[in-house]
Image (spheres, grey):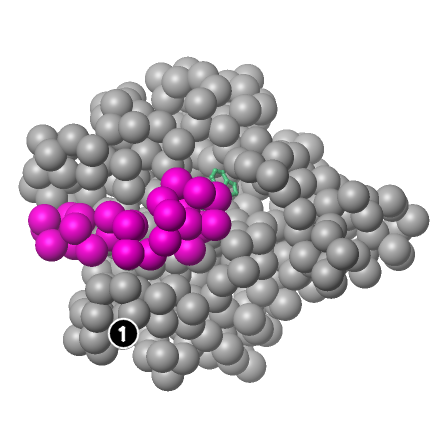
């Protein structure tokens, strides 16, 4: 499975930080975050809300552009080892410089340096999607969107929203999404992970996104499934994440296969791999086991993913 070329569209950079890496940074900075690790050194959380808290505590060890440069390189090494040739990663001015544009540019430069090095040495291409955080509220999202708009270009290709889907409504973030769209950024939103079909509909109607992060709970509304298939809306599906967080009991119960059969454009990603004990290779293996997906199916999905990537056509042509 590691030999198959893979395209990953949904990966949170901080969420991809190996626990050993975060522990090392915390030690350097004399920061006590030992409570977020279990006795085996893995991240420990009880449920999704707790996961978000642990995620933010781990992120607090990432303090400087240099930390993000090392993180990006470590994450890209891991992805390349799984056969990923193109990755779109969520990055956030909320965590990188507190939405200060000057600081954000420095973080961005550091991440781009890592991306350039990884492209030269490992043949993996990285692009960034700036993400606002839903539970931080619409006002902060405006600042995040302004940073995104100012740095939109060939490396920052998109804008999105992550965080607690149960807090606020997509329409509260309309200004931020309009600002990003006007700057030429492509749009995606986490929806239909913790919220049901109505949450997916709201993201499509109120934010006019072209991709949905997760979106799997659309399966609960057959009319919505048909609409997604007709519109060609792409779902960034992260099956291992959904299983680890308890949305589905196991891969066999996961709706990715049903959505694919109904004509919805699904893609495969890991979300926050060390938190969910997954890799792109593991996602492929589990999907093969659960649904008998073969090489032809995985190649179809990788093509679908590259088509849906937010980078420009020249970049896609180089990867294809
Ligand atoms: N941020 C990191 N992982 C996330 C997830 N699975 N859902 C919402 N926000 C997130
Ligand atoms: Zn996510």
Q: Quadrant of the N terminus?
A: bottom left
Residue 203 drawn at (x, y percent): 30, 28
Total residue callouts: 1
Residue 248 drawn at (x, y percent): 36, 45
Residue 64 drawn at (x, y percent): 76, 50
**Secondary structure beneath disc 1?**
loop
Q: Is-magenta flag for residue 263? A: yes
Residue at 54% x, 24% y is 135
Residue placed most toward the observer, 111 or 56 = 56
Residue placed most toward the observer, 162 or 130 = 162
Q: Is residue 128 visible?
A: no
- The residue labelled by disc 1 is 320
Residue placed most toward the observer, 256 or 88 = 256
Q: Tell me: residue 147, above or below residue 244.
A: above
Quarter of the image for residue 57 reads top right
Quick check: 125 left or right of 53?
Answer: left
Quarter of the image for residue 165 reads top left
Residue at the right extreme, as displayed: 30
Residue 59 drawn at (x, y percent): 69, 45
Q: Is-magenta flag for residue 191? A: no
Q: Tell me: residue 288, above or below residue 59.
A: below
State the extent of the magenta-drawn residues as a range: 238-264
């Amino acid at each position: 499975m590691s030999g198959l070329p893979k395209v990953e569209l949904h990966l949170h950079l901080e969420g991809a930080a190996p626990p050993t890496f975060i522990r090392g940074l915390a030690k350097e900075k004399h920061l006590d975050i030992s409570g977020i690790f279990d006795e085996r050194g893995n991240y420990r959380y009880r449920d999704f809300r707790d996961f978000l808290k642990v995620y933010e505590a781990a992120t607090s060890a990432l303090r400087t552009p240099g930390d993000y440069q090392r993180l990006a390189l470590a994450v890209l090494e891991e992805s390349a080892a799984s056969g990923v040739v193109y990755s779109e990663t969520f990055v956030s001015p909320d965590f990188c410089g507190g939405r200060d544009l000057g600081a954000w540019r420095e973080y961005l430069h550091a991440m781009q340096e890592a991306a350039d090095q990884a492209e030269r040495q490992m043949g993996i291409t990285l692009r960034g999607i700036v993400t606002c955080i839903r539970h931080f509220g619409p006002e902060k999202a405006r600042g995040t969107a302004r940073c995104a708009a100012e740095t939109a270009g060939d490396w920052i290709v998109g804008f999105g929203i992550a965080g607690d889907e149960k807090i606020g409504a997509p329409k509260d973030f309309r200004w931020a999404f309009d600002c990003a769209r006007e700057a030429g950024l492509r749009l995606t939103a986490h929806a239909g992970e913790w919220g049901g079909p109505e949450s997916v509909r709201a993201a499509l109607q109120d934010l006019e996104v072209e991709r949905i992060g997760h979106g799997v709970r659309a399966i609960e509304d057959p009319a919505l499934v048909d609409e997604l298939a007709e519109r060609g809306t792409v779902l960034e599906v992260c099956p291992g994440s959904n299983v680890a967080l308890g949305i589905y009991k196991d891969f066999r119960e996961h709706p990715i296969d049903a959505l694919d059969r109904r004509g919805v454009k699904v893609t495969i990603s890991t979300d926050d791999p060390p938190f969910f004990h997954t890799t792109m290779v593991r996602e492929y293996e589990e999907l093969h086991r659960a649904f008998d997906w073969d090489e032809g199916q995985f190649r179809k999905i990788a093509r679908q993913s590259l088509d849906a990537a937010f980078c420009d056509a020249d970049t896609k042509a180089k990867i294809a």
